[in-house]
Every structure is written in structure tokens, then in C-alpha cells.
Amino acid sequence: MIIGSGGLGHIGIQVLKALTAAELVVVDRNPEAVKPAGSVGAAHGVVAGGDQVERVLELTGGHGAEVVVDFVGEGGAPP
């Protein structure tokens, strides 16, 4: 799972898509950032609006994310 699909997140999506066979799920609170994520390699885009955990569980058959990469890089983001 990739958190944040802004500028750095889009680069991260492309790199992870090129280097891994992982099914990439991108989560961002901005719908406009999630839209183009599929065109750069994400299998799924989820808008964080309160139900993102349920959506990721649904997309992963109830397993959840095996790895989480955070590309938010915002001062207010939790560590």
C-alpha cells in the first residue's frame, strides 16, 4: 500500500511497479491525486474519507497490506 499519491508518490508508484510484482494500492485523501495513480502503475486507488481501511481490506481479500510506504511528507502527518 502506498500512502500519498502526489508528486513524490507518483514517482514511488512508478519505481515500485518497475521493481516489484506487487499489486499496488494507493491511498490519498485527495481524489484528484488518486485519479492518475492508475495510469502510472497502481492497481487500485482509494480515497481516504473514513472508510479506507475497509476498502483496502476488501481489495486484499481481508488480508490487508503486507507493506506500507508513506509518501505524504507533510509536517502534519503522523510519524
Image (cartoon, rainbow, N blue to C red):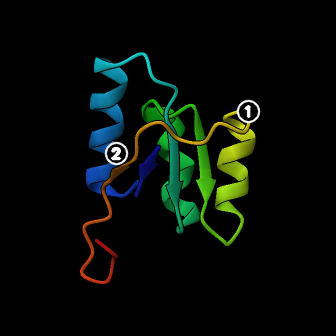
Q: Amino acid at mark 1?
A: Gly
In the figure, 23 relative to 13: above or below? above
Q: Amino acid at mark 2?
A: His
In the figure, 71 relative to 67: above or below? below
Q: Is residue 74 left or right of residue 66?
A: left
19 or 38, nearer to the observer: 19
Q: Quadrant of the C terminus?
A: bottom left
From the image, tell me which residue sits under label 2.
10
The residue positioned 60% from the left and 42% from the top of the image is: 64
The residue positioned 49% from the left and 33% from the top of the image is: 24
**For the residue carrying disc 1, how many other residues have a C-alpha within 10 Å: few (<14), some (14-19), or many (20+)?**
few
From the image, tell me which residue sits under label 1.
61
Q: Is residue 11 left or right of residue 56?
A: left
Q: Is residue 52 left or right of residue 27?
A: right
Disc 1 to disc 2, C-alpha distance: 25 Å
Give how far across and how far down residue 11 sits, in percent: 27, 41
The residue positioned 69% from the left and 45% from the top of the image is: 57
